[in-house]
Image: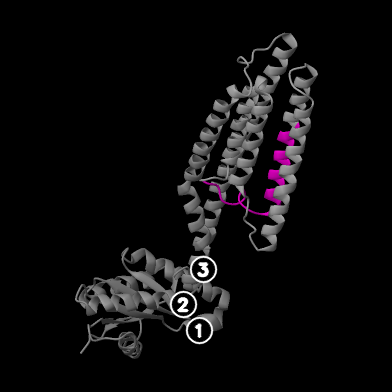
Amino acid sequence: MSTVLESGAKHARSGALPAPWEGGHRTRLTMLVAVGVSYALDAVFLACFWWLGRIELSLPLLYVAAGLGHILLFTLAFRIGDARGQRDLLLTEWQMAAAIAVQLGAVLLAPWIKAYFLCIIFVVFAFGTLSLSVRRALLMWLGTCAMTALTLQWLPSQHTVPVSIPANAREAVLVGVAYASILLRCLLLNHYGTLLRTRLIQRQRKLTEEVEAVHRLASHDLLTGALNRHAMLPLLEGQIQLVQRGRQVCALALIDLDHFKRVNDNHGHLTGDQVLCRVVDTMAATLRPSDKLARYGGEEFLLLMPATTLAEAEVVLERVRAAVALQHWQDLVPGWPITLSAGITNVHPSDRLDDVLARADTSLYQAKNGGRNRCVSLPWQ
C-alpha cells in the first residue's frame, strides 16, 4: 500500500495522471475509440471540403486510412506489450507523434485548409497530455513546434497559395462548424482531465484512510483501542537506547486489574470486555500526551513514560489508580469494585528489554501480595 501511495505522490508531483488513465486494457480501448471517433469526425469535415471543391477526394480517403492505420498499429503494439507483461503501456508520445505527423502531412497535401489541420494539433495535445508529465509534454511541444515550422517553411516551394479565406456562405458555415468541433473536443478533453484528477484525489484520500486503518489494526488492540504488545515493545526498545545514550530518563509500569477473572466468571465475558474498555478510557484520560499505553495481554497493560523519573512515574500511576478506583462501575458490575495494581520501575543504561520487563513484573507481584489496589516501585539496583 505504501508503494501505491508513493506512486500516486510521484505522479502528482510530476503532473501526470496515474491509474485509471495510465494502463489497463479498458483504458487503452477507450483511448483508441476516442482517437477513432476524432479521426472519423475530421474525415467528415474533409469530405465536406471536398464536396465544396476545396480539396481532392483522395485527402479524406487518405485521412480515413491514416486513422485506421493508427488504430490497428497501436492495437498491435498494445497486444505485444501485454504479451511482454507491460500492462501499463500507453505509448502516449508515439500516438501523439503519429497523429501530428498525419496533420502535417495533410498540410502539405491541402495547404488551402492548412489552418484546420494545425488546429487539430491542439486536440492531439489536449488528448495526449492527460497522461504526460510536464517534462514529457514540453518535449513533445518543442518537437511539434520544430516540425510544424519546417513543414510551413517547405510549403512555398511546393504550393504558392494565399491564407485561406472562406469563398462563400457555405464554406464559412463549414469552417465555423469545423473550428467549433475542434474547440469542443479540447474543452471536453480538458474537462475529462479535471474529472480524472478529481477521481484520483478521492482515490488517494480513500487509499490513505485505508492504509491508516490497516496500520491502526496492526498496532492497536481491537477491543480497547490501546496499543498492542507488538507495537509497544519496539517503542520500549527505542527508549532504552535513548537512555543508554544518555539522552533522557524513562520509566515503565506494568498494570494488572485486580480479581478480573471473577468479573468474567460472575458477569460474563461481554461485561468483562466493557470493563476493559472503560478502564482504558479512564487511564487514557488521566495520562500525559507523551505516555504510551498498551494492552500487554488479557487484563495486563504496559505503560511507557518517556522523559520521566521514577518519582514522577509514581505520581502518574497513583493518579491513574485513583481514577480507576473512583470510576462509577455499578452499571456494569453492581456491588463489585474495579481496581488495579501497578509495578513501576525505571530504565537504566545497562538494561536490556527483558531486564526492564522483569523488574516491572517483580514490582507488580509485590503490589499484588501487598493487598492490591496499590502501586509499588522497584528501582534499578
Number of residues whose C-alpha sits closer than 10 Å to that of mark 2, classed few (under 14), some (14–19) or many (20 or more): few
Instruction: Tell me the colour scheme of the image.
Output: one colour
For numbered disc 2, what is the local secondary structure? loop
Magenta residues span 16-40
- Count the labels in the image: 3
Residue at point 57%, 38% (across, down): 194
Residue 356 is a magenta residue: no
The percent coordinates of residue 50 (x first, y second) are 78, 21
Residue 51 seen anywhere in this rendered image of the structure:
yes
The percent coordinates of residue 319 (x first, y second) are 30, 70
Q: Amino acid at mark 1?
A: Arg
Q: Locate the C terminus and report the quarter of the image it occupies.
A: bottom left
> Along the horizontal axis of the image, is 321 left or right of 225?
left
Q: Quadrant of residue 351?
A: bottom left
For numbered disc 3, what is the local secondary structure? helix
Q: Residue furthest top?
A: 168
Residue that carries the numbered disc 1 in the rendered image: 262
